[in-house]
Amino acid sequence: MPELEVLQRRLEREKQARKQAESLLEEKSRELYVANQEMHHAALALKEQSDRSAAIVDHAAEGIVTFDGKGLIDAFNPAAERIFGVLAKEALGRQFHTFFNASSMDELLLLHSKSAEQEKKVQLGQRKDGSQFPVDVVTSSFVVQEKKVHTAIIRDMTKRHELEQQLAHAQKLESIGHLAAGIAHEINTPIQYVGDNAQFLSEAFEDLEKLLAAYGELEKAVQGNEIAMPCIEKVTAMVAEVDLDFLKEEIPSAIRQSIDGTERVAQIVRAMKDFAHPSQQEKTATNINQAIESTITVCRNEWKYIAELELDLDPELPLVNALAGELNQAILNLVVNGAHAIQEKLGESSAEKGTIRVVSRRCEEGVEIRISDTGTGIPPDLLEKIFDPFFTTKGVGRGTGQGLAIAYNAIVEKHGGQLKVESAVGVGTAFVIQLPQTDVSTSQPAGEVR
Amino acid sequence: MRVLFVDDEPNVLAGLRRMLRSYRLEWELEFAGGGEEALQRMQEQPCDVVVSDMRMPGMDGARLLSVVRDAFPATVRIVLSGQSELERVMRAVGPAHQFLSKPCDAELLVTTIKRAVALHDTLSNGDLAALIASIDTLPSLPGVYEELHQIVLLDETSIDQVGALVSQDLAMTAKVLQLVNSSFFGLPHRVTEARHAVTLLGLDRVRPLVMMAGVFCQFEQTAFPAATLPRLVHHSLAVATTARRIAEVETSCNQTIEDAFLAGMLHDLGMQIFMSQLPDEYPAVIELAQTKQVPIWEAEFESFGTNHALVGAYLLSLWGLPDPVIEAIAWHHRPGQFPGASFTPLTAVHVANALQAKHSPLDPENLITQVDFAYLEQLDLTHRIPVWQGLADTIMAEEVVQ
């Protein structure tokens, strides 16, 4: 092979190789360009995402705070500044627990220890000026680059707490108004017949005076040895005119029924006094049987057309340390609930009546009150909802769905007792209140929110 | 007269029996412990008046009174309730003629019963008396009724709007005044204006009243020209306004002035009763008045033995409206029949009705209504006629302007 030809071929290969290299280079640089472009976009997207995250954190209504394993704060958003009245730069580096009513991180975290990562807890926050307020805190933790990061989302519950208190107050007022109407009815009835009887007695006395006058004349005639016959005839006529037999029979019962009537009114007024216990803050030794009796007297109008009420009260019952007003309210709500359940079963204006039974007994923990009715009963799937605020199966205007929730709150939250329910559809429902007899004054923070 | 008292509390019945002992010669008193027992008693022997408690086990007062209304329409039905919630008492708004609240003293109870039955005999037509006593409610102008139904459901509706609407309708006016003036409300003064009554009731109570069956209803009779009812309302308003103006210049007694207005407003309510209750017979009566060229009340008298003035007064007396108003309505055509020595709402309504050139829509067109000179002579008031005529003319002129 001539050398030229060899060289030419080599050159060709060189050219070929070069071409290949060039196109490879071109291809690579295009790839590089594309990659570059993508990276640029990614960087932009990343920045946007980070901006957005920051904006979300900055503009969130909830306080968002992150802290490290030692509890030192490393992020504090504007909402948190607002809630605690502290600037972020002041907060950074401070211990997270110092913003709450906890003396150490451990104590704060103790509140979270019940369940693992996402336990909702309510406690008191502390502002810069030292004032305390109810907060709702949700914490979660995760691991970033082998470091544990804790995030807390903090919600100021002051407003909601106020609203809840207003609502509870409004509900109380409404139930008092309703109760007052019932009590008025209970009192109006005896007042009606006491008044009627008094009217009758006054007229009857006038009649008797006439009769006595006739007797007086007779007496005079007899004393003066006059002829008594005309006077006797007058007396006889007068006896018939005033219908003496009727008066003799009716006057005693008019008096008796009037006394019964005033006693009835007095009983209702006494029960009202017992029931109300206005603004009682401290628990006092309470006679549970008396509380039951007062309460059912006060709400008699709610059940008397619907049910017979049977009382079975243990006379040996010990006194229980309780907030009588709250306890009465709980008993009231359960009795009224029972009456409504019976009415629902029997229908409006039924001639038949159901039975509400209230039993008090000693039990292991202390005292047990059992309030049972022969009403509709509660279906099993609703049993766990009945103590939820606003849960109601009653029609509009019948109930606000607060009755059982208030009873629950009064027994469980305020007295550390238990409120259990047993029910069978079509048979009836029994609510069992258990109150610990020992001193139950484990006082709870004033801002407690369930 | 037989009066039946119904209450589930035996002590209340015993008290009433003793309290009413002095009426034992005038009245036959019956007592029943519940709704079922009361009906049984009435089946044995009907009563003229039933006075019933509201809440009773089994058949309650509202149910009892509706059954009584259907089975014994002529019986006067009165509620005597210790209930303090209006909402509960309202259940009996239809079937009860009147409402008394416990505690109720002897005097009020007795006068209420006496007044409710007082006009019964003047009606001199037993069937018609029963028919009227069975009326729960009178039909309203369809337009007003529909509008009321719509606006009470709106949040932005004010009580004034409702009051203005109610006062445009005779039936609604009568009904709200019946309610507000019942002893249940315990108002110290009687209320004579529908607007005022509606304000006192308040929107929360008017709403269920409007929505409840048997309180208000719509006029559905087609036997009469559609314009009849609106013209009747128009005439009534004109007479009411004139009667009030006349009373204002004749007396300083506010009660008389207000009663004159109310009586003027309701003086022809009886026509509406005839139209709704006797739709088959009444057109012939209207025709009779036309043929004979006599006032409609004379034609009514010829056909029914009574007239719209007495019929309206009877229903309103059952509903417990005040006596001066009832008298003014009953005798507004013939005031001479009701002797009196001084100016009363009757005088005002009679004169206003005569001086208003626009007749009630059922009178013959060209008939001239005269004031009763003999009656005015008796009161020594004939010289006032020109003044009153002037007032009536002014009101008519104002109407034309409007």
Image: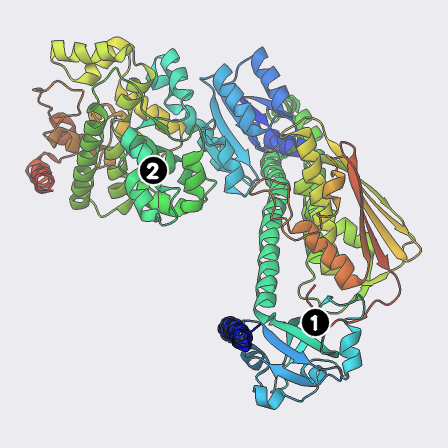
Residue B147, picture quadrant: top left
Quadrant the C terminus of chain B occupies = top left
Chain of the residue displaying label 2: B
Q: How crowded is the residue under tag 1: few (<14 C-alpha within 10 Å), some, or many (20+)? A: some
Percent coordinates x, y for residue A335 in the rendering: 73, 45
Whether residue A215 is visible to the viewer of this picture, yes or no, is: yes
Label 1, on which residue?
Answer: A139
Question: In the displayed structure, would residue A5 be above or below residue A365?
Answer: below
* Mark 2: secondary structure: helix
Q: Is residue A323 left or right of residue A87?
A: right
The residue that appears at 67% across and 84% down in the rendered structure is: A73
Disc 1 with disc 2 on a shared chain? no
Label 2, on which residue?
Answer: B148
Percent coordinates x, y for residue A159 in the rendering: 56, 69
Q: Is residue B398 left or right of residue B40?
A: left
Question: In the displayed structure, would residue B272 be above or below residue A9?
Answer: above
The residue that appears at 66% across and 79% down in the rendered structure is: A66
